[in-house]
Image (cartoon, rainbow, N blue to C red):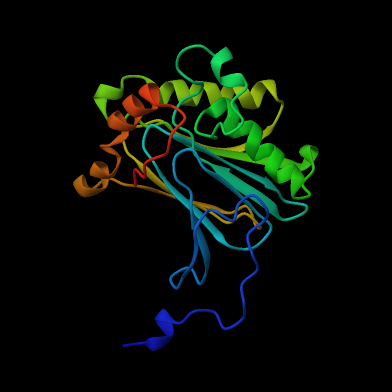
C-alpha cells in the first residue's frame, strides 16, 4: 500500500474566507488539494487553489471567476425564484441561496467582497438536466433563468454545459478558473438525484427551515 496516497499536507492550510467557514473543507488525496462540497442552497468563494465540487440534476451551478486576481466561487440552486408570494420573502434575513435570484447575486457579491472586480468576471454555468420526468420543466426553467440573468447583468459567459437527461459532477478550481465536468450515466449515479422531487416538495411546504443533502 502506498502510504503517501493517504497522507495529508504537512503545512497548515489557510482558513476559509469569512462567511464560508461553515462549509466543510477536507483534504482530497486524489486532487492533492483542499476540497469543498457545495450542497443545494449553498455557495462558496475562495482565493486559494482548492477544489469546489457539486453534483447537479435539474439544479444549476454558476462558477464565477476573476482571472486577473485569482478569485472564484460556485453556487448551487434548485429553483429560479421562491414559490408563492415574493413579498413574504423579501424581509427574511436568513434567506438561503437556494433560489437562483438570490444565489447569483450572493455569489457575485462574495467574489467582489473578496477583492474581485465586476469588469473582470467570467461565468461558467452547468446543470439543468431533466433527470426525472416527474420534475417536468424545472431544469429548463433554471437554464432560462440563469441565461437571462447573465444577459441582463451583462456578464461574460465563457462556458456552459446545460440540459440533457443526465446528472453531472462539477469540479471547479476557484483560483485558476478551471472546471471539470463529468456526466453520470450509470444507474447508480442517476439514483443520486432521485430525491430532488422530495426536496422540491419540502421546499414549497417549509422553505425557511433546514436543508437536506441530496448527493
> Residue at point 50% right, 72% down?
32
Left or right of 37? Residue 150 is right
Picture coordinates of residue 135, whole percent (x, y): 30, 23
Residue 163 shows in the view: yes
Front position in the image: 72 or 202? 202
Picture coordinates of residue 82, whole percent (x, y): 49, 20
Left or right of 128? Residue 155 is right
Picture coordinates of residue 137, whole percent (x, y): 36, 19
Q: Is residue 113 above or below residue 175?
A: above
Query: What is the tally of numbered marks visible in this picture?
Result: 0
Residue 157 shows in the view: no
Task: Please identify the quarter of the rendering in which residue 119 is found.
Answer: top right
> Residue at point 72% right, 51% down?
67
Picture coordinates of residue 51, whole percent (x, y): 53, 59
> Residue at point 58% right, 54% down?
178
Q: Quadrant of the N terminus?
A: bottom left
Left or right of 136? Residue 35 is right
Q: Is residue 215 above or below residue 197?
A: below
Q: Is residue 34 above or below residue 87?
A: below
Q: Residue furthest left?
A: 187
> Residue at point 65% right, 68% down?
14
Amino acid at each position: 500500500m502506498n502510504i503517501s496516497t493517504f497522507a495529508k499536507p504537512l503545512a497548515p492550510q489557510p482558513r476559509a474566507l469569512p462567511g464560508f467557514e461553515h462549509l466543510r473543507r477536507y483534504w482530497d488525496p486524489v486532487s492533492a488539494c483542499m476540497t469543498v462540497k457545495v450542497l443545494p442552497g449553498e455557495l462558496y468563494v475562495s482565493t486559494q487553489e482548492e477544489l469546489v465540487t457539486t453534483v447537479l440534476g435539474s439544479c444549476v451551478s454558476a462558477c464565477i471567476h476573476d482571472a486577473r486576481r485569482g478569485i472564484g466561487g460556485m453556487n448551487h440552486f434548485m429553483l429560479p425564484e421562491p414559490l408563492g408570494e415574493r413579498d413574504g420573502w423579501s424581509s427574511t434575513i436568513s434567506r438561503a441561496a437556494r433560489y437562483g435570484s438570490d444565489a447569483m447575486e450572493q455569489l457575485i457579491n462574495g467574489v467582489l467582497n473578496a477583492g474581485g472586480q465586476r469588469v473582470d468576471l467570467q461565468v461558467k454555468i452547468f446543470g439543468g438536466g431533466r433527470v426525472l420526468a416527474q420534475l417536468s420543466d424545472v431544469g429548463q426553467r433554471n437554464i432560462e433563468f440563469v441565461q437571462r440573468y447573465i444577459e441582463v447583468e451583462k456578464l461574460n459567459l465563457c462556458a456552459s454545459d446545460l440540459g440533457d437527461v443526465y446528472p453531472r459532477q462539477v469540479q471547479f478550481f476557484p483560483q485558476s478558473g478551471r472546471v471539470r465536468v463529468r456526466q453520470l450515466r450509470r444507474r447508480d449515479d442517476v439514483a443520486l438525484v432521485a430525491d430532488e422531487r422530495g426536496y422540491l416538495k419540502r421546499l414549497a411546504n417549509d422553505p425557511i427551515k433546514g436543508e437536506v443533502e441530496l448527493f
